[in-house]
Amino acid sequence: MRSRYFLLVILVLVLLGGFAGAVYAYDHAQEGQIAKGVTVGGVPIGGLTPTQASARLRSQILDPLREPIVVHREKRRWKLGAKEARIATDLDATVDDALARSRQGSIFERVWRGIRGEGIDATLEPTVTYSDAAIVRLLNRIRHSVDRKAKDASVTIDGGGISHVSSRTGRRVLATRLHRQIRTAMIDPTAKRSFAAHTTRVLPRVSTSDLTKRYATVLIVNRGAFRLTLYKDLQVAKSYPIAVGQAGLETPAGLYHIANKAVNPAWHVPDSDWAGDLAGKIIPPDDPENPIKARWLGVYDGVGVHGTSDDSSIGSAASHGCIRMHIPDVVDLYPRVPVGSAIYIA
């Protein structure tokens, strides 16, 4: 009886030893293979050897990342290659990590998992490094080629007339957005690697339309030529002969604005020696002693543009500082010139 029990024990031990050997042999055969369910950067590598996994990851991750970045605008192209971008990955270390995770758990857990065809849930992300300075250099090249400064409009007024420089709208590359797109492409093998260099408009601080409105009407008085020229929207509209101040009572030079207007105005005589007994008085419009005929456009300190009955004075320095015009001319000019219009006396 004892011998039969002993034989039974021996048989059980033999069977257990065989089972353990089989378990060990199976696990040993799997130790160079990555478990099912392991992915790296979205690429499945379960069931592969480390060499096979490395080859697959190079093909599906590293090779796409080494494709050049291309930025385009119209017919121009800019490239950033992998060498300049210093793209590098830790794929070999990631594969080692995947293999280590595949060996986690006891030998029986691994064998049982393998027999049932189960995998492990392991999602790994490789580390991708690159040179952000290289991206910045690329963006600088693009901006140097594409960016354009806005140009302000300007006006120059002198005795010769009005000259103006038109404004120009500038443009600026949307560099922050482009930088973000390129950085994504540096680490994502599925991201597109060609981008348009989009721009935004840069408006001038002073536009041509601003100046056209500001100088919608301008008068230029050329004392030496005895001419008054009317400009509308920075263009010559009409020119008139005039008389200006005589020696000692010159029409004051400079840039002024039309301060007031009147039809058939009274004459507020300046309190000056040349006015004699009339100094400080107000002469009615119909009084023969009133030299201001038909229209008045006030300029500065009693000086203005007005009509005159002394037509022979036109074309000479004859007034007491005002700008005289033929009556039909001042009547023609009057409705064309709003209060506030610029008048430049050269």
Image: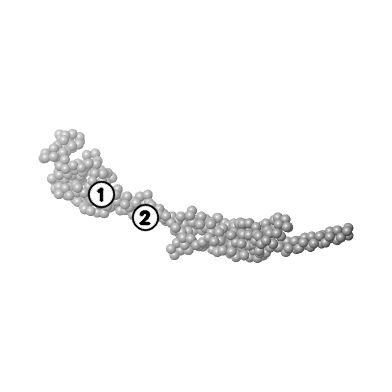
Q: Disc 1 and disc 2: Cα gap in Å?
A: 23 Å
Q: Position of residue 113 (x, y in %)?
A: 68, 59
Are the two marked residues, 1 and 2, in contact with CB atoms closer than 8 angstroms? no
From the top left corner, tell me how far across and down residue 303 is, in percent. 22, 41
Residue ID at (79%, 60%)? 16
Query: Which numbered dot is residue 270?
Result: none
Q: Residues within 10 Å of mark 1 (few under 14, many from 20)?
A: many
Q: Write down the quadrant of residue 301 in the picture.
A: top left
Tell me which numbered mark, 1 or 2, is placed earlier along the sequence.
2
> Of helix, strand and loop, which one carries label 2?
loop
Residue 323 position by quadrant: top left
Q: If the image is split into quadrants, where does the N terminus sit?
A: bottom right
Visible in this render: residue 321?
A: no
User: Which SS class for mark 1?
Assistant: strand
311 relative position to 95: left or right? left
Residue 8 visible somewhere in the drawing:
yes
Q: Which residue is labeled 2 in the image?
A: 168
| Quadrant housing residue 198 | bottom left
Q: Which residue is at 48% across, 54% downward? A: 177
Q: Residue 133 versus residue 124: which sits nearer the camera?
A: 124
Q: Pointer 1: what residue?
A: 217
Vertical arrangement, residue 76 with respect to residue 234, above or below: below
Q: Relative to 341, is 172 above or below?
A: below
The residue depicted at 66 percent of the width and 62 percent of the height is 117
Q: Amino acid at mark 1?
A: Thr
Residue type beneath disc 2: Arg
